[in-house]
């Protein structure tokens, strides 16, 4: 037998199960990247877009004296979640944000929210505003930099209201005494700790220095949904999450099928826009399950 007649070593056959597993893991990695991009980048763009729309709407309401001055409508129902109720300005931080009604994880994607069972800014009592620290623009990401004496200005349907910062409180710090009868206070609340890894909550208290305005339409504490309390997610997002998870699974299987039956480049051309769109939408829905102050 000559050298040419010697049998050649067999080429190992392609292993479809392992190839399929590798492709699915690559798609899973892409979805995780979509989740990170949604929280840090795309969410910030969404926040700015929603703020521009809210500012335009609220400015129109102020000009026509139709801006809400209570947490309840004229027929006694809760204001719709996300309804603009105030414009928050903090000169030290060069920040201007439209405040919406409600504090669920969904509503705080668009900007700070007003806790329903507290008076609106400018009214007697303690008004409470919640905002995200890092995700979706992180509008309250720098409120820990505020110092005693800094100014905070809020504009509502009852006019302009000025506050003076009293200090920053973290977990374990003593509670402040409630404001005197007929006086007002503002408390800003966000997450404390590293970005995207909250450990507790941080509060900034400010005293109302302008004239107190009339209070109306008080909302009892039990009227606040569980999804609008501190550091909780929004369970109402579970249904859309399941729907988009199914859509993502179907899209992933379709891309894998194209890769195996047609070719790699066809799968890239089809898969990148398809999986990118579905993955970002799925990530946006899933983010609602995370703590609302994240």
Image: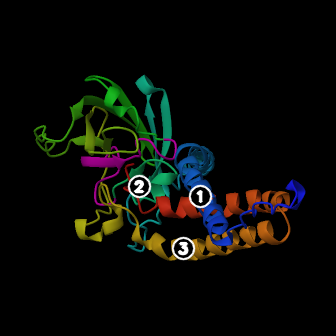
Element assignment for label 2: loop
Q: How far apart in space, not on screen, are marks 1 and 2 (Cα)?
A: 43 Å
Q: Quadrant of residue 77?
A: bottom left
Horizontal side of residue 166 vs 138, given as left or right: left
Q: Is residue 294 above or below residue 277?
A: above
Give x and y (percent) for residue 258.
80, 69
Residue 64 makes an appearance in the image: no
Task: Choose the circle earlier in sequence order: 1 or 3.
Answer: 1
Task: Choose the circle earlier in sequence order: 2 or 3.
Answer: 2
The residue that label 3 is drawn on is 240
Q: Which residues are magenta?
A: 116-137
Give x and y (percent) for residue 219.
29, 65
Task: Choose the circle earlier in sequence order: 1 or 2.
Answer: 1
- Magenta: main secondary structure: loop
Give x and y (percent) for residue 130.
36, 48
Q: Are marks 1 and 3 in contact (CB under 8 Å)?
A: no
Q: Quadrant of residue 250?
A: bottom right
Q: Quadrant of the N terminus?
A: bottom right
Give x and y (percent) for residue 206.
26, 34
Q: Are marks 1 and 2 in contact (CB under 8 Å)?
A: no
The residue that label 2 is drawn on is 69
The residue that label 1 is drawn on is 31
Residue 237 makes an appearance in the image: yes
| Foreground pick, 140 / 118 | 140
């Amino acid at each position: 037998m000559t050298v040419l007649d010697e049998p050649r070593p067999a080429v190992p056959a392609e292993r479809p199960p392992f190839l399929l597993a590798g492709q699915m893991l690559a798609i899973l990695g892409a979805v995780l990247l979509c989740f990170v991009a949604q929280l840090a980048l795309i969410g910030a763009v969404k926040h700015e877009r929603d703020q521009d729309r809210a500012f335009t709407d609220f400015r129109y309401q102020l000009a026509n004296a139709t801006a809400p001055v209570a947490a309840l409508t004229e027929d006694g129902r809760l204001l719709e979640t996300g309804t603009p109720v105030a414009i928050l300005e903090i000169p030290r931080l060069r920040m201007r944000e439209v405040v919406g009604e409600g504090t669920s994880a969904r509503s705080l994607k668009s900007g700070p929210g007003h806790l329903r069972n507290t008076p609106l800014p400018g009214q007697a009592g303690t008004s409470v505003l919640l905002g995200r620290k890092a995700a979706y623009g992180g509008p309250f990401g720098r409120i820990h930099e505020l110092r005693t004496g800094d100014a905070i200005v809020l504009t509502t349907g009852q006019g302009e209201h000025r506050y003076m910062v009293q200090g920053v409180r973290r977990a374990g710090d003593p509670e402040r005494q409630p404001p005197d009868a007929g006086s007002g206070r503002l408390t800003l609340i966000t997450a404390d700790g590293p970005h995207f890894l909250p450990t507790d909550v941080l509060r900034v208290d400010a005293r109302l220095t302008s004239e107190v305005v009339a209070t109306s339409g008080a909302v009892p504490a039990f009227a606040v949904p569980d999804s609008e309390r501190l550091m909780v997610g929004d369970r109402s997002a579970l249904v859309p999450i399941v729907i988009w998870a199914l859509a993502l699974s179907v899209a992933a299987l379709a891309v894998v099928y194209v890769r195996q039956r047609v070719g790699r480049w066809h799968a890239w051309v089809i898969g990148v826009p398809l999986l990118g769109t579905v993955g970002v939408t799925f990530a946006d829905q899933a983010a609602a399950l995370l703590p609302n102050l994240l």
